[in-house]
Image: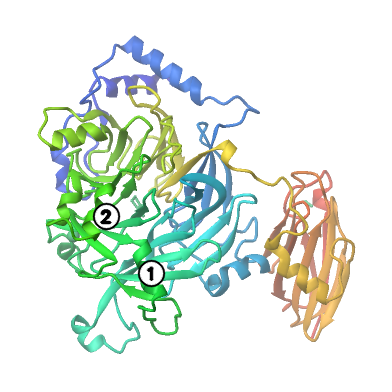
């Protein structure tokens, strides 16, 4: 412990140990990385130690005490969502979404497979951007939405039960990447970007002359209530990240491949790519007036937003921009330059003039383009007019002032950079508490670092990532916690604990398992009391209750080849008494929490005796909570 502090002391004093580590970012630009502590004067060892102690006290949550914030982390290519308490950074829960989960049975149970629909055949996912539904620019705590880049899906998670309840595959695009929500008047649309440019139609009919084929990708809006795709907008170039404004009128997205190239060199050819801005009321009006087409089998209205369209505007910005972030005061869209050391500040108040053709040059909406450092990827905000931008190549977070950046851009001699803080290492997203809402409170900053290198005990060639917690409540940013994570949280969102209201046990009328309840009603089964086996041709439905430590049925008979559906209703009322159901050697496992009904379907393909058991520890006699399926040979 004392060793670590000494090392950090050394870093603070400028004896950065990263200097000896060499570059990891695949770029020669690292050599250009500048000095670290621009704004921060070097403190004495004593006063710095005192400051760190103070910060550490803030994040120390006593056993039994609760955190002030919920954090929702994307799980990257593990496909899930993780729930953390902040500032302790304790992991509270995992919510399987685009993955299969052995513990809860997500992807195995009938209820989850109904949510997954056609896409249940995919066992992988790649979740990047978790965002909480809003009413009037404030988190309303109802839903969390998240994209799946791997299989072009968008999912909705109900935050009262922390389960995914709807999912949609966006048609005619490949790889849904950027995702943000309409903030005002409420989240009616989930905006999401199709990243990759593909030929249309993409049915192999145009492969002989692909260059001549029409090629594009689309910006998409999903109806947050129905989770159906509301509309799609054809764009030039490609689409990376997106965000919406605080008037409900505009959404914007970055494009890094204005070149429409298929290779790396081609994608870096232009000095500027662009931000495309979408005029949502104009798009809605065009669709209402019938000015749209449809593609293939899809019924989704598609409008054309390519250059010259009245629905969009293209604003040139340097170079391969990545993150797109709206400041919580509603004044700016900020595009992060990635291959340019700058971020571009787009003044949202000027967009009306841009759309009404009152500006000669779309660049007139760029009110400042501050230079911050190497590899700016994402920006987040406090409530005091400051922004925090990750510098991937410099492995730093830079704190800068929005208004001072504008004054400097106008030629005033004013320093806009407040501080640069080393992070460990190569940060992607960062996220400040409540920053995507009007309630941004400038207390905590999470920085999601892609590389941890030497920060943790080694665990083989695959290293942990490092989500760092930084105290931003004072003048100076202070790193207070390292949080190792598994592949690969891209982004997170922090809400105050009062904004999230969860159920402690299920309601019997919860829509999550309503279809299973309807099936039971058809079979004349009362789920809360009946323990019954219903045969329907070669389909067998086994209905049982569970009350710690017993199942309502401890033995049932089926025939080899039967399709068996086991439906269990957990009649326990006490919080925390979750049961499970695992049929040995059948790949069958599920969670049944108090007052929940869960079901799972499998084929009884092996004659003989097969034990099933409860796999969620529920009682002193949990081991004894078992039963047998007897399968007669065909
Ligand atoms: S992206 Cu991963 S670091 Cu998908 Cu939001 Cu920028
Ligand atoms: Cu029921 Cu363990
Ligand atoms: Ca480019």
Compared with residue 634, is residue 433 higher up or lower down, i.e. above or below?
above
Q: Secondary structure at mark 1?
A: helix
All told, the count of numbered labels is 2
Q: Position of residue 284 (x, y in %)?
A: 40, 68
Closer to the camera in the image, 357 or 386: 357
Q: Position of residue 148 (x, y in %)?
A: 44, 62
Side of 117 where 56 appears, left or right: left
Closer to the camera in the image, 251 or 631: 251
Q: Which residue is mark 2?
A: 352
Residue drawn at x 24%, y 33% is 403
Is residue 171 in sight in this rendering?
yes
Q: Position of residue 139 (x, y in %)?
A: 51, 45
Side of 577 where 413 appears, left or right: left
Compared with residue 547, is residue 476 higher up or lower down, i.e. above or below?
above
Q: Which residue is mark 1?
A: 285
Q: Secondary structure at mark 2?
A: helix
Side of 525 where 425 appears, left or right: left
Image quadrant where one finds the C terminus: bottom right
CA distance for labels 1 and 2: 16 Å
Residue drawn at x 46%, y 80% is 299
Q: Which picture quadrant has residue 438?
A: top left
The colour scheme used to paint the residues is rainbow
Q: Residues within 10 Å of mark 1 (few under 14, many from 20)?
A: few
Residue drawn at x 15%, y 53% is 363
Side of 559 where 128 appears, left or right: left
Is residue 109 in sight in this rendering?
no
Image quadrant where one finds the N terminus: top left
Q: Sequence-wise, which precedes: disc 1 or disc 2? A: 1
Q: Position of residue 58 (x, y in %)?
A: 49, 23
Q: Which picture quadrant has residue 226?
A: bottom right
Residue drawn at x 27%, y 38% is 395
């Amino acid at each position: 412990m004392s060793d670590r502090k000494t090392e950090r002391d050394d870093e603070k004093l400028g004896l950065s140990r990263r200097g000896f580590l060499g570059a990891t970012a695949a770029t020669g630009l690292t050599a250009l990385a500048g000095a670290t502590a621009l704004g921060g004067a070097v403190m004495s060892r004593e006063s710095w130690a005192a400051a760190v102690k103070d910060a550490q006290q803030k994040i120390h949550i006593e056993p039994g005490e609760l955190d002030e914030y919920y954090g929702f982390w994307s799980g990257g290519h593990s496909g899930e969502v993780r729930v953390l308490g902040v500032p302790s950074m304790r992991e509270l829960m995992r919510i399987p979404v685009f993955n299969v989960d052995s513990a809860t049975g997500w992807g195995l149970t009938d209820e989850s497979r109904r949510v997954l629909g056609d896409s249940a055949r995919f066992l992988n996912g790649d979740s990047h951007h978790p965002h909480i539904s809003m009413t009037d620019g404030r988190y309303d705590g109802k839903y969390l939405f998240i994209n799946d880049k791997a299989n072009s899906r968008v999912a909705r998670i109900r935050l009262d039960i922390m389960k995914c309840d709807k999912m949609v595959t966006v048609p005619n695009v490949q790889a849904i990447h950027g995702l943000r929500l309409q903030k005002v008047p409420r989240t009616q649309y989930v905006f999401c970007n199709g990243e990759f440019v593909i030929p249309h139609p993409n049915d192999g009919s145009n492969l002989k002359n692909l260059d001549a084929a029409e090629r594009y990708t689309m910006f998409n809006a999903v109806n947050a209530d129905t989770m159906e795709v509301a509309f799609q907008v054809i764009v030039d170039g490609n689409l990376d990240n997106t965000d919406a404004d605080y008037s409900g009128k505009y959404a914007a997205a970055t494009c890094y491949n204005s070149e429409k190239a298929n290779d790396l060199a081609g994608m870096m050819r232009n000095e500027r790519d662009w931000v495309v801005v979408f005029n949502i009321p104009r798009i809605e009006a065009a669709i209402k007036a019938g000015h749209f087409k449809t593609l293939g089998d899809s019924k989704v209205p598609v409008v054309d937003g390519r250059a010259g369209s009245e629905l969009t505007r293209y604003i040139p910005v340097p170079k391969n921009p990545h993150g797109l972030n709206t400041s919580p005061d509603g004044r700016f869209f900020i595009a992060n330059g990635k291959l340019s050391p700058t971020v571009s500040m787009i003044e949202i108040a000027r967009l009306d003039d841009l759309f009404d053709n009152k500006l000669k040059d779309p660049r007139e909406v760029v009110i400042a383009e501050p230079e911050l450092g190497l590899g700016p990827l994402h920006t987040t905000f406090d409530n005091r007019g400051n922004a925090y931008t990750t510098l991937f190549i410099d492995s730093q977070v830079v704190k800068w002032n929005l208004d001072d950046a504008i004054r400097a851009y106008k030629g005033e001699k004013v320093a806009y950079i407040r501080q640069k803080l080393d992070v460990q290492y190569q940060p992607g997203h960062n996220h400040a508490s409540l920053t995507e809402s009007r309630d941004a409170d400038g207390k905590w900053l999470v920085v999601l670092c892609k590389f941890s290198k030497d920060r943790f005990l080694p665990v083989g060639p695959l290293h942990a990532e490092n989500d760092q917690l930084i105290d931003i409540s004072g003048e100076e940013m202070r790193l207070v916690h390292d949080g190792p994570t598994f592949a690969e949280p891209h982004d997170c969102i922090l809400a105050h604990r009062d904004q999230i209201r969860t159920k402690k046990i299920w309601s019997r009328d919860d829509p999550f398992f309503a279809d299973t309840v309807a099936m039971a009603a058809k079979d004349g089964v009362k789920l809360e009391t009946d323990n019954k086996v219903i045969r329907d041709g070669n389909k067998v439905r086994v209905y049982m209750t569970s009350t710690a430590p017993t199942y309502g049925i401890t033995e049932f008979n089926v025939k080899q080849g039967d399709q068996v559906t086991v439906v269990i209703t957990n009649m326990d009322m006490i919080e925390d008494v979750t049961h499970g159901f695992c049929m040995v050697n059948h790949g069958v496992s599920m969670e049944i929490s108090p007052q929940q009904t869960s079901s799972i379907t499998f084929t009884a393909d092996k004659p003989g005796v097969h034990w099933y058991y409860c796999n969620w520890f529920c009682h002193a006699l949990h081991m004894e909570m078992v039963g047998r399926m007897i399968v007669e040979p065909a």
